[in-house]
Image (tube, rainbow, N blue to C red):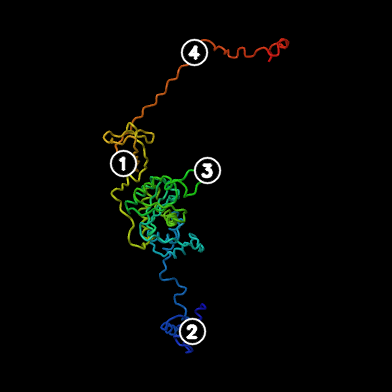
């Protein structure tokens, strides 16, 4: 019997003797008057045991049987479930093994089996979070995470993610290289699925911003005094489709996408392990079918304003043209252009006035094809065979019959000095 039980028993006995009313006893032990009357009847029938619950010390009627307990612990002890926390483990037990149990019960099982070690909760720094944007599509954070997503089972992958600031809606894809072309492919899929957002929020990586080049001994100018740098290929593409690019000055500034990587590096890695994904295609299949739907259903929030800020693509927007590698070249006198160490001739039917000496736009599309545009018209081009360079023949050396004669340029160079006696006879002027 605990001290609390003893206090309840004293109050009940005082109520039975009439020292206090049943209402006062109910207030004293925190129960209703009806329950006090019930306890008084039990006290009269069973004595002091009336304050002790009959189920105390007995297993709960809702407790799972030992077979389910042992089965769950055996499942969570497998290698593919290594590192799972109680929350994720309870979800996988329910989804894949039909063992429905709360996460706190799973936590107690895992702690008892040595599969989970409880950690003390520490109060971190109090940080004032930036308010979310009010509408979906006002701001989309864009970044790439380098991680061992497939662990040791497959190649190294990169996860490119776009997360909406207002709703936390996720759009992502695995790639083999964090290149301009792969980022453009993901941008293409986002624009086709959701439309054009108002702005993208990224870091200052070389994919998004051209880095200034200064000599070592030259002091770098302040930011507001630098000459404007040309945009990168992604910066140009965003400008052509009418999307604002915003640079973050620190990783904490784009914290929403950074925290999404923390969640993905825990849950997504373990999900790929359970799914036994080994290739890029298998990883993307799991990402599209399992992880992104779970994220958007569980972690996405409702925006403050129901209106969508995404805009549809206009008629003058061409994704194949904008999302390509673009350079400008000058047309030669023979209506040819040089690009990538090759010479291309413009088709005769596409020759127009003002084309010679003008600048044309060369687009290397994501599918590998090349398109050449002059003003608002595309030109037909064909590769020319470059004439091989003719190297002049070397003149044969003259063959001599005998040995080469010795040079005579040193002849009479060392003369014998005259006698001193002869010099003394000469007059001074002659000597001088």
Among numbered discs 2 and 1, the one appearing first in the sequence: 2
Which element is circle 1 on? loop
Report, in whole angstroms, how far the alpha carbon at label 2 lies from the one at label 4.
134 Å
Q: Pointers 4 and 1 in contact (CB under 8 A)?
A: no
Give the spatial CA distance, label 4 vs label 3: 59 Å
- Rate crowding at label 4 as few (under 14), some (14 to 19) or many (20 or more) other CA atoms within 10 Å: few
Q: What residue occupies the far left of the structure in this picture? A: 349
User: In the image, which is nearer the foreground, mark 2 or mark 1?
Assistant: 1
Q: What element carries label 3?
A: loop
Assess disc 3: are there few (<14), some (14-19) or many (≥20) residues with their C-alpha within 10 Å of its C-alpha.
few
Q: Mark 4 and mark 3 in contact? Answer it, CB < 8 Å.
A: no
Q: Which of 309 and 145 is in front in this view?
A: 309
Instruction: Give whichever of discs 2 and 3 has the lower sequence position.
Output: 2
Q: Name the residue under label 4.
A: 399
Residue corresponding to mark 2: 11
Residue 143 location, x and y as percent? 42, 51
Among the two numbered marks 4 and 1 on one chain, the one whose residue lies closer to the N terminus: 1
* Cα separation between marks 4 and 1: 64 Å
Dot 2: what SS?
helix
Could you tell which of marks 1 and 3 lies nearer the N-terminus?
3
Q: Residue 375 carries which label?
A: 1
Chain-order first, disc 2 or disc 4: 2
Residue 167 location (% of width, % of height): 37, 59
C-alpha separation, residue under disc 2 versus residue under disc 3: 88 Å
Q: In this view, does 66 lie above or below 160?
A: below
Residue at 36 percent across and 29 percent down: it is 386
Residue at which label 3 appears: 218
Query: Disc 2, disc 1: CB below 8 Å?
Result: no
């Amino acid at each position: 019997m605990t001290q609390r039980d003893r206090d309840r028993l004293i109050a009940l006995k005082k109520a039975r003797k009439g020292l206090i009313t049943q209402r006062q006893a109910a207030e004293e032990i925190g129960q209703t008057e009806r329950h006090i009357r019930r306890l008084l009847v039990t006290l009269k029938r069973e004595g002091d045991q009336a304050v002790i619950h009959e189920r105390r010390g007995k297993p709960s009627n809702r407790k799972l049987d030992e077979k389910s307990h042992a089965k769950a612990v055996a499942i969570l002890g497998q290698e593919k479930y290594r590192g799972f926390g109680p929350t994720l483990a309870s979800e996988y037990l329910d989804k894949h093994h039909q063992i429905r149990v709360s996460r706190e019960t799973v936590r107690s099982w895992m702690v008892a089996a040595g599969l989970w070690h409880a950690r003390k909760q520490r109060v971190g720094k109090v940080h004032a979070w930036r308010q979310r944007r009010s509408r979906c599509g006002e701001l989309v954070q864009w970044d790439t995470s380098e991680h061992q997503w497939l662990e040791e089972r497959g190649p190294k992958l990169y996860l490119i993610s776009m997360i909406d600031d207002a709703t936390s809606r996720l759009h992502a894809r695995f790639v083999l290289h964090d290149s301009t072309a792969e980022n453009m492919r993901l941008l293409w899929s986002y624009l086709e699925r959701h439309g054009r957002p108002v702005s993208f929020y990224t870091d200052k990586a070389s994919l998004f911003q051209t880095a200034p080049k200064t000599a070592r001994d030259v002091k770098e100018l302040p930011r507001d005094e630098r000459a404007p740098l040309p945009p990168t290929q992604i910066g140009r593409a965003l400008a052509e489709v009418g999307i604002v690019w915003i640079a973050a000055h620190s990783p904490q500034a784009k914290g929403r996408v950074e925290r999404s990587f923390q969640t993905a590096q825990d849950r997504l890695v373990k999900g790929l392990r359970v799914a036994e994904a080994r290739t890029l295609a298998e990883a993307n299949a799991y990402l599209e079918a399992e992880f992104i739907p779970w994220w958007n259903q569980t972690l996405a929030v409702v925006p403050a304003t129901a209106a969508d800020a995404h805009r549809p693509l206009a008629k003058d927007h061409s994704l194949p043209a904008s999302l390509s590698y673009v350079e400008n070249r000058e047309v030669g006198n023979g209506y040819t252009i040089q690009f990538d160490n090759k010479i291309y001739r413009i088709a005769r039917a596409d020759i127009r006035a003002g084309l010679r000496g003008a600048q044309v736009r060369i687009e290397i599309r994501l599918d590998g094809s090349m398109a050449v545009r002059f003003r608002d018209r595309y030109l037909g081009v064909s590769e020319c065979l470059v004439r091989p360079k003719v190297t002049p023949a070397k003149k044969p050396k003259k063959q001599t019959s005998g040995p080469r004669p010795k040079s005579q340029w040193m002849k009479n160079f060392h003369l014998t000095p005259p006698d001193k006696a002869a010099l003394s006879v000469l007059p001074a002027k002659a000597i001088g």
